[in-house]
Image: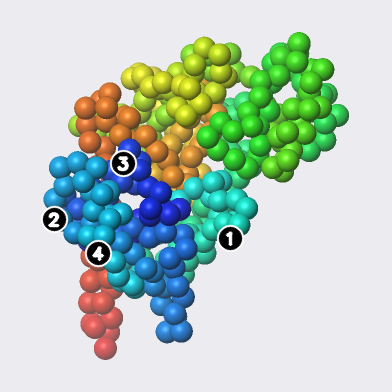
């Protein structure tokens, strides 16, 4: 199996990233793994999608560190490959980090992935589904039962009215963004500064005003779904908890939070079941759900990270299970084509 992993930039990938772990798992399971940056694609005159790609050269790796050193170093295999010849193209870039002079990169994976899919490559997550999820408005298309009460606007007066109606703390955050940047909790005592907070968040576009979930004080649970189902391997769920620092409302790790083991409950599985139909319909192969209490805070469909964190607590290499699922998809497609070709031959 030939797999291509699309990332923001090959040289900025890190040892702990889920994409790095997937690359190691693919190679160790006997597959060919290429890594492609968002600026490395080309659409050739022969209507083929190509890319300047990198591949680590060893047939087996005992650590993520050695794999990434080979991939990013001078020993890496560098070729201009034909993407249409790949079996699988995994879109693992994060558009929210591509701003300023690289704003062109936000949709690059989607644009080239669509063409590759047209030529028979299995592209995951589905680029047409990802196009719908370019900002957090996508979250509002899921069942109301799983979502916090939310207002999305740039009007300060509407946000003030929403805060008054809630009669409780609210959260402000940008519609486009990730990593806990520009996130504020507005309590009763903070309303005098609401204008300034909204102005700070609105610099990046629309503002999300959302009810504050008291259960957030205990952190959130990241639960991975694969093919619409909770990712489970050897009886263990791919999940972990992020617990926020005592003086920060955010549980993101780079915002001061720390990791803990997760206990997946019937409530978590019920939430996963409620969102499953749309995720499957939109072709979302690998997804991260961020659960707080009985609500979802976010659905990460672009580059859900943390499989290594789940492995740390559950002692299971979930990346192997992901590669096995890709093998099944490729085998199914190949069998389908064989049957189709045989039917065509029989009708000649």
Mark 3 closeness class: few <14, some 14–19, many ≥20 residues within 10 Å: some
Taking the image as shown, residue 105 lies to the left or right of residue 77, namely right
CB contact under 8 Å: marks 4 and 1: no
Does dot 4 land on a helix, a strand or a loop? Answer: strand
Task: Give whichever of discs 4 and 1 has the lower sequence position.
Answer: 4
Q: Pointer 3: what residue?
A: 15
| Residue drawn at x 43%, y 65% as measured from the top left | 40
Figure quadrant of the C terminus = bottom left
Q: Position of residue 292 (x, y in %)?
A: 51, 22
Q: Give the distance between the C-alpha atoms of the residues marked 2 and 3, in whole angstroms.
A: 18 Å
Outermost residue, right side: 157
Name the residue carrying label 4. Answer: 77
Numbered circle sitting on residue 104: 1
Q: Nearer the viewer, residue 170 or 100?
A: 100
Give the alpha-carbon distance from disc 2 to disc 1, as whole Å: 35 Å
What residue is disc 2 on?
A: 59
Q: Quadrant of residue 272 in the image?
A: top left
- Mark 4 or mark 2: which comes first in sequence? 2
Residue toward you, 315 or 97 = 97
């Amino acid at each position: 199996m030939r797999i291509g992993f699309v990332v923001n930039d090959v040289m900025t990938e890190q040892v702990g990233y889920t994409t790095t772990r997937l690359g190691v798992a693919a190679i160790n399971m006997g597959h060919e793994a290429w890594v492609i940056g968002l600026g490395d694609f080309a659409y050739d005159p022969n209507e083929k999608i190509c890319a300047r790609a990198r591949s680590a050269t060893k047939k087996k790796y005992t650590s993520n560190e050695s794999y990434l050193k080979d991939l990013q170093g001078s020993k890496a295999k560098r070729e201009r490959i034909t993407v249409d010849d790949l079996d699988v193209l995994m879109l693992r870039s994060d558009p929210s980090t591509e701003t300023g002079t690289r704003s062109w990169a936000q949709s690059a994976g989607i644009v080239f992935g669509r063409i590759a899919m047209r030529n028979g490559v299995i592209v995951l997550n589905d680029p047409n589904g990802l196009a719908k999820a370019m900002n957090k408005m996508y979250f509002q298309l899921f069942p109301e039962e799983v979502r916090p009460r939310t207002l999305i606007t740039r009007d300060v007066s509407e946000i003030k009215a929403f805060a008054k109606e809630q009669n409780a703390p609210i959260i402000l955050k940008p519609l486009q963004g990730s990593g806990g940047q520009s996130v504020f909790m507005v309590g009763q005592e903070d309303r005098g500064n609401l204008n300034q907070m909204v102005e700070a968040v609105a610099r990046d576009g629309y503002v999300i005003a959302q009810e504050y979930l008291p259960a957030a004080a205990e952190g959130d649970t990241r639960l991975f779904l694969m093919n619409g189902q909770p990712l489970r391997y050897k009886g263990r769920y791919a999940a972990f908890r992020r617990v926020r620092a005592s003086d920060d409302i955010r549980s993101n790790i780079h915002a001061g939070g720390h990791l803990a083991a997760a206990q997946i409950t019937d409530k978590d599985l019920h939430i996963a079941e409620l969102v499953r139909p749309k995720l499957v319909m939109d072709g979302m192969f690998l997804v991260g759900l961020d659960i707080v209490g009985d609500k979802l805070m976010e659905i990460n469909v672009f580059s859900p990270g943390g499989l290594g964190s789940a492995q740390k607590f559950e002692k299971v290499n979930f990346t192997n299970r992901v590669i096995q699922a890709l093998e099944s998809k490729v085998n199914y497609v190949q069998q389908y084509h064989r049957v189709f070709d045989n039917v065509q031959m029989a009708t000649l």
